[in-house]
Image (cartoon, rainbow, N blue to C red):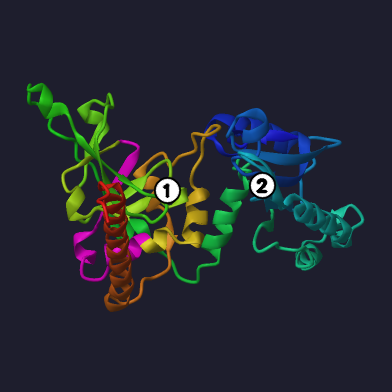
């Protein structure tokens, strides 16, 4: 069946997951893209396919790993049919698993060593397919692909540094004591997912109270709680100093004692990398299209690999700044072209 992924990943549905674990063998869970049903059903709810077999007895414990897969394309997009479709390959990988799985059994008993060996025969589809054993000690643990993929990526890190050792969470609430109506009109900032650049957004007609806003300062690392997994993480520049964001954003700063060894822009590039975004995806939960990181503490729990020397970090940071300057130069060129083409024509 197809389920809203909130059933698989939110605390509100922990009882449902425990019920599934008690009464069914979980054979497969296939994560579908957010736009899977947007064209046909006008919904962007995040969903998964879940394949279950009813247990003969609730006391029987599942010893076989679960086949997890992620389909990035399913033959449809938000605008209609698409030639790209991961589902046939996922189906082939699942059939391959069903073919080799029996060799990991000795009668009705699972031989864990043999099973681990035959798992290697299952196509990984460039890490879109993985096999995971569920924990006996956590009957209501998350059952979504992203969570287990996150655990796999973190376990593969030979060395780890928690972000809490590098970053502090910061909350600055704007002054709302002034009675002048204009004083409570704020200029906003935002962070683009396409390049991780924090930009001014201007005055917005939004009905936030001051306590629901946050002031950003130059050098802050700004993270969108809703769109971090899509790359909305960036460093606040001087052009956004003093602007505000909604409480949906989280603000961090490099710890004082780490200023001489960590470059903020380099750290942002690490957090925006495909590997780290996959790890971030495993931390978020949500119902339908409101998946989000709920608090700054969720980010601070995440580990990263040890950083290179500050000099190496700054080399990457410099390239980022050069790319941003090239963006600004390109905008000026296009504006000049538009002005030229809009100018009144003169007789030859």
Callout 1: SS:
helix
> Which is closer to the viewer, label 1 or label 2?
1
Pinpoint residue 146: horizontal percent, then vertical percent. Answer: 58, 49
- Residue 38 in the magenta stretch? The answer is no
Relative to 135, does residue 314 appear above or below in the rendering?
below
Residue occupying the far right of the picture: 107
> Which residue is located at x 7 percent, y 26 percent?
178
Along the viewing direction, whichever of 321 and 210 lies nearer the viewer: 321
- The span picked out in magenta is 247-268
Callout 2: SS:
loop
Relative to 275, does residue 88 appear above or below in the rendering?
above
Along the viewing direction, whichever of 343 and 127 lies nearer the viewer: 343
Relative to 118, does residue 82 appear above or below in the rendering?
above
As drawn, the label of residue 103 is none
Q: Are marks 1 and 2 in contact (CB under 8 Å)?
A: no
| Label 1 or label 2, whichever comes before in sequence order | 2
Q: Quadrant of the N terminus?
A: top right
């Amino acid at each position: 069946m197809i389920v809203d992924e909130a059933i698989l990943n939110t605390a509100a549905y922990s009882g449902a997951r425990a019920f599934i674990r008690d009464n069914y063998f979980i054979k497969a869970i296939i994560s579908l893209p957010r736009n899977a049903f947007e064209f046909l059903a006008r919904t962007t709810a995040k969903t998964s396919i879940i394949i279950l077999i009813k247990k003969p007895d609730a006391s029987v414990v599942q010893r076989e790993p679960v086949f997890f897969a992620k389909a990035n394309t399913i033959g449809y997009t938000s605008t209609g049919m698409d030639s790209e479709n991961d589902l046939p390959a996922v189906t082939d990988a699942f059939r391959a698993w069903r073919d080799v799985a029996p060799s990991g059994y000795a009668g009705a008993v699972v031989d864990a060593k043999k099973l681990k060996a035959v798992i290697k025969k299952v196509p990984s589809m460039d890490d879109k397919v993985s096999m995971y054993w569920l924990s006996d000690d956590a009957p209501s643990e998350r059952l979504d692909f992203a969570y287990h993929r996150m655990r796999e990526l973190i376990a593969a890190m030979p060395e780890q540094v928690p972000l809490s050792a590098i970053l502090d969470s910061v909350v600055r609430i704007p002054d709302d004591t002034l009675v002048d109506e204009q004083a409570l009109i704020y200029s906003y900032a935002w962070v683009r997912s396409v390049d991780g650049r924090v930009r001014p957004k201007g005055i917005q007609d939004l009905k936030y109270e001051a306590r629901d806003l946050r002031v950003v300062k130059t050098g802050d690392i700004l993270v969108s709680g809703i769109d971090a997994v899509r790359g909305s993480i960036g460093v606040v520049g001087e052009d956004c100093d003093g602007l505000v964001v909604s409480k949906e954003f989280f603000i961090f700063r490099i710890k004082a004692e780490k200023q001489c060894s960590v470059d903020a822009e380099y750290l942002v590039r690490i957090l925006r990398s495909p590997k780290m975004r996959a790890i971030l995806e495993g931390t978020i939960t949500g119902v339908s299209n409101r998946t989000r990181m709920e608090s700054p503490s969720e980010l601070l729990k995440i580990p990263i690999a040890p950083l290179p020397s500050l000099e190496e970090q700054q080399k990457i940071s410099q390239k980022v700044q050069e790319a941003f300057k090239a963006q600004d130069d390109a905008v000026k060129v296009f504006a000049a072209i538009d002005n030229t083409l809009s100018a009144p024509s003169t007789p030859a």
